[in-house]
Image (cartoon, rainbow, N blue to C red):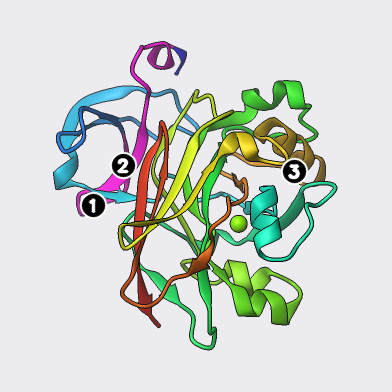
């Protein structure tokens, strides 16, 4: 992998289908003209080895770039302005919750608003994809366990979050974790702009430099609690501006240096 990662252009690892089994490919080219260079095997477990086969991106359907092998670990209230907008204090240590891997959907796939919830919110977030088995990772070595970064929408049934106390249903229902469009390894995520759009209108803006606990801190804290497996994902919290998404609307999460994840909302 290192040879590929040493190249100048940022590597983008996509998971896609052209109708058959999912494959992985490196995305190259300018927006609208991207080509997928198919790689052998799963980049989580094998070096990035191009096969020589290429597929125009327009002929492929992108899938969630990773299906977390065991879990998505979410972090709550990691931007002070977002904690304040919902009337909460900033936690003294990272506030963790879990989303099941069955919550994950890919770019363009619908978020199915659950029947019985009166308010479902978008939350645009930076997602960290873990690349190796790890436990008790020190902050200084956190970068060693990261495969790369992608965009996430931590979709939340806000009314259930309040009424249930536990967040499992509110943040873990099917389709509540869109991920994509691809994984970017080696990105410096210390100060990236995050933008969320609802039907094209900007509703959230923030910078990762405003996180209460930065990515190395989060990896240290999360791995102190849980063994992390290749393909596990950490959601790093949402900037201010959360609000409801309703049937027929489309949410886009764009992160500088990564790309844009877009998903429509549909009724159950
Ligand atoms: Mg969140």
Q: Answer yes or no: do the residues labelled 1 and 3 have beta carbons within 8 Å?
A: no
How far is the residue under mark 1 from the one under mark 3? Answer: 36 Å
* Residue 23 image label: 2
Q: Mark 3 points at which residue?
A: 222
Instruction: Judge the density around disc 2: few (<14), some (14-19), many (≥20) Cα neighbours within 10 Å.
Output: some
Q: Nearer the viewer, mark 1 or mark 3?
A: 3
Mark 3 or 2: in front is 3
- Disc number placed over residue 20 in the picture, else none: 1
Where is residue 210? Give x, y as percent: 63, 39
Residue shown at 71%/82% (left/top)?
A: 163
Where does residue 95 sit, x and y in percent of width and height? Answer: 76, 53
Q: In the figure, is residue 154 to the left or right of 164?
A: left
Q: Which of 16 and 97 is in front in this view?
A: 97
The quadrant in which residue 134 appears is top right
**Residue 150 visible in the picture:** no
Q: What element carries label 3?
A: helix
Within 10 angstroms of label 1, few (less than 14), some, or many (20 or more) residues?
A: few
Question: Where does residue 2 sit, x and y in percent of width and height?
Answer: 46, 14
Kindly identify which numbered label has been placed on residue 89: none
Q: How many marks?
A: 3
Q: Does the magenta stretch include residue 96?
A: no
Question: Spatial distance from mark 3 to mark 2, Cα to Cα?
Answer: 30 Å
- Provide residue 49's location: percent of width, then percent of height: 34, 22
Residue 247 vertical placement versus 22 (above, below): below
**Tag 1 near tag 2, CB within 8 Å:** yes
Ligand 1 closer than 8 Å to label 3 CB: no
Residue in front for this viewpoint, 180 or 122 = 122
Q: Residue at point 61% right, 32% down?
A: 132
Bounds of the magenta segment: 3-25
Q: What residue is rendered at 50% in x and 32% in y? A: 45
């Amino acid at each position: 992998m290192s040879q590929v990662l040493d190249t100048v252009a940022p590597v983008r690892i996509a998971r896609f289908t052209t109708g058959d089994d999912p494959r992985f490919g490196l995305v190259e080219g300018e927006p609208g003209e991207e080509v997928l260079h198919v790689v052998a095997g799963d980049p989580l477990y094998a070096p990035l080895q191009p096969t020589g086969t290429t597929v125009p991106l327009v002929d492929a359907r992108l899938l969630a770039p990773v299906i977390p092998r065991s879990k998505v670990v979410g972090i709550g209230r990691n931007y002070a302005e977002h904690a304040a907008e919902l009337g909460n204090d900033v936690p003294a240590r990272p506030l963790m919750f879990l989303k099941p891997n069955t919550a994950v959907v890919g770019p363009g796939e619908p978020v199915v608003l659950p029947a019985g919830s009166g308010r479902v919110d978008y939350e645009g977030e930076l997602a960290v994809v873990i690349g190796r088995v790890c436990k008790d990772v020190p902050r200084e070595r956190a970068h060693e366990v990261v495969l790369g970064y992608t965009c996430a929408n931590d979709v939340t049934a806000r009314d259930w979050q309040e009424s249930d106390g536990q967040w499992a249903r509110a943040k873990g229902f099917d389709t509540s974790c869109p991920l994509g469009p691809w994984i970017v390894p080696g990105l410096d995520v210390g100060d990236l702009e995050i933008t969320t759009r609802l039907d094209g209108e900007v509703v959230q803006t923030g910078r990762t430099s405003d996180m209460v606990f930065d990515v190395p801190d989060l990896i240290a804290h999360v791995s102190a609690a849980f063994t992390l497996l290749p393909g596990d994902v950490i959601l790093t919290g949402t900037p201010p501006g959360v609000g409801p998404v309703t049937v027929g609307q489309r949410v886009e999460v764009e992160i500088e240096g990564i790309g844009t994840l877009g998903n429509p909302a549909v009724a159950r």
